[in-house]
Image: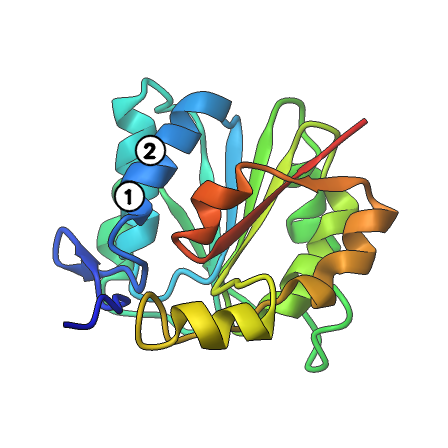
Amino acid sequence: MSKVTGHTSYKGLTAQQHNDVFDVFKNFLSEIKPKRILEIGTAGGGFTLFLRETLNDLGLEDTPIKSFDVHECPWYDDIRKQNVEINIENLFDHSYFNLEKPEKIVPYIQEEGTTLVLCDGGHKIGEFNMLSPFIKVGDFIMGHDYVDTWTNYKENYVDKIWDWCELEEKYIEQVSIDHNLEHYNKEIFDKVVWVCKKKMA
């Protein structure tokens, strides 16, 4: 029987995540206690709502979530009522090589305390590469649908764990070197197809 997941839901909202992502992220959020979260790609909203409720459960009600997507969805207003800021705006140019509206997010990222940036929109490679230069020492940046190599994806993920690979290490290797980003709990996050990197001093 196939173990492939991806159509998970959270409280009736689509999450588009691996089944095990909820436990992994709950432990992660408990560990790093972010002061704010920036999410690119609200989509079905299930994962966004999960993040909000998990932060609340951890006593981090004051940690804001700022989420961006390019299309409004009928369920976004209900999520907004739960103290999530959802913005309908593309921050990037059509090539996904340039951040067009840095003023919308860069000051937010660079506020004091740990920022967690989640790249889960329509062009994860571009998002990761464009946002990495703005995170501070001690911040985290993550990207979804990640498998470190295409060979690993084809051999160990397809029809077994996850059928989507939109981000490989080779596409974010240079920005990781340039900005001193190091893998964080790689083995754990590999299992739920996320990359997590921390900016080191």
For the C terminus, the image quarter is top right
Amino acid under disc 2: Lys
Provide residue 176's location: percent of width, then percent of height: 77, 50
**Which sits in the foreground, 34 or 161?**
161
> Total label count?
2
Provide residue 181's location: percent of width, then percent of height: 74, 42
Residue 24, image quadrant: top left
For the N terminus, the image quarter is bottom left
Q: Residue at x 59, y 61 (%)?
A: 148
Amino acid under disc 1: Phe
Provide residue 23's location: percent of width, then percent of height: 28, 38
Left or right for 156, reference 47: right
Rendered view: 177 above or below 128: above
Disc 1 + disc 2, Cβ < 8 Å: yes
Q: Residue at x 26, y 69 (%)?
A: 4
Q: Residue most toward the top? A: 59
Q: For mark 2, does the 10 Å Cα neighbourhood hold few (<14), some (14 to 19), or many (20 or more) residues?
A: some
Left or right for 16, reference 91: left
Rendered view: 166 above or below 17: below
Reading the image, the residue beneath label 1 is 22
Question: How far apart in space, not on screen, are marks 1 and 2 (Cα)?
Answer: 6 Å
Left or right for 35, reference 17: right
Provide residue 16's location: percent of width, then percent of height: 31, 64
**Which sits in the foreground, 12 or 87?**
12
Reading the image, the residue beneath label 2 is 26
Q: Residue at x 28, y 48 (%)?
A: 20
> Mark 1: which secondary structure?
helix
Q: Residue most toward the right? A: 178
